[in-house]
Amino acid sequence: MDPTHLNDCHLIDIPKITDPRGNLSVIEKDLLPFSVQRVYYLYDVPSDAHRGGHAHKEQLEFLVALSGSFEVKLDDGASTKKVQLNKPNKGLLIPTGIWRELGNFSSGSVCLVVSSGVFKEADYLREYEDFRLFKGR
């Protein structure tokens, strides 16, 4: 059984350099507990749409609201919690074996996803029952 649980999901502060000309935040190699292999972003998501709806067997992900806001519902197979992301200098670390659903996107929101692995369909648990079996529940 995978030992990952909701306490392993946590917010990480991204260093912020404040300047009168505009702020700058940087994600460097020591900020995350994994080597970055893939970066992608979600945008133009309708407010009533949902993204995610899966878990990963091996990949870790780090989500950042670059613009606007959205909600992340996390599920470890035993309990759930919701995290609101709305600051470009805070990101949510999601380890392996955590089901995630993204929703309540504000207008103009952009979700950056930094991942520990390249895309592999075999790494995805796309059906909730498969996820529960993976978790041993």
Image (cartoon, grey):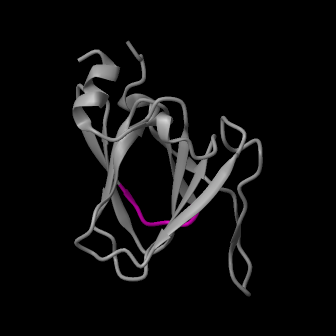
Instruction: State the residue at coordinates (74%, 79%).
Output: 19
Q: Which residues are magenta?
A: 84-89
Image quarter where the N terminus lies is top left
The picture quadrant where one finds residue 136 is top left
Q: Position of residue 57 (x, y in %)?
A: 47, 29
- State whether residue 2 is above or below residue 117: above
- State whether residue 91 is above or below residue 18: above
Q: Position of residue 62 (x, y in %)?
A: 55, 48
Q: Left or right of 123: which side holds 15? A: right
Image quarter where the C terminus lies is top left
Residue farthest along the top direction in this orientation: 1
> In this figure, what is the number of numbered marks?
0
Q: Nearer the viewer, residue 121 or 62?
A: 121
Q: Nearer the viewer, residue 7 or 128?
A: 128
Q: Position of residue 72 (x, y in %)?
A: 34, 53
Residue 51 painted magenta: no
Instruction: State the residue at coordinates (66%, 35%).
Output: 33
Q: Position of residue 7 (x, y in %)?
A: 40, 29
- State whether residue 136 is above or below residue 29: above
- State whether residue 116 is above or below residue 7: below
The picture quadrant where one finds residue 97 is top left
Instruction: State the residue at coordinates (55%, 38%).
Output: 60
Instruction: State the residue at coordinates (74%, 87%).
Output: 21
Q: Main secondary structure of the magenta part?
A: loop
The picture quadrant where one finds residue 22 is bottom right
Residue 87 painted magenta: yes
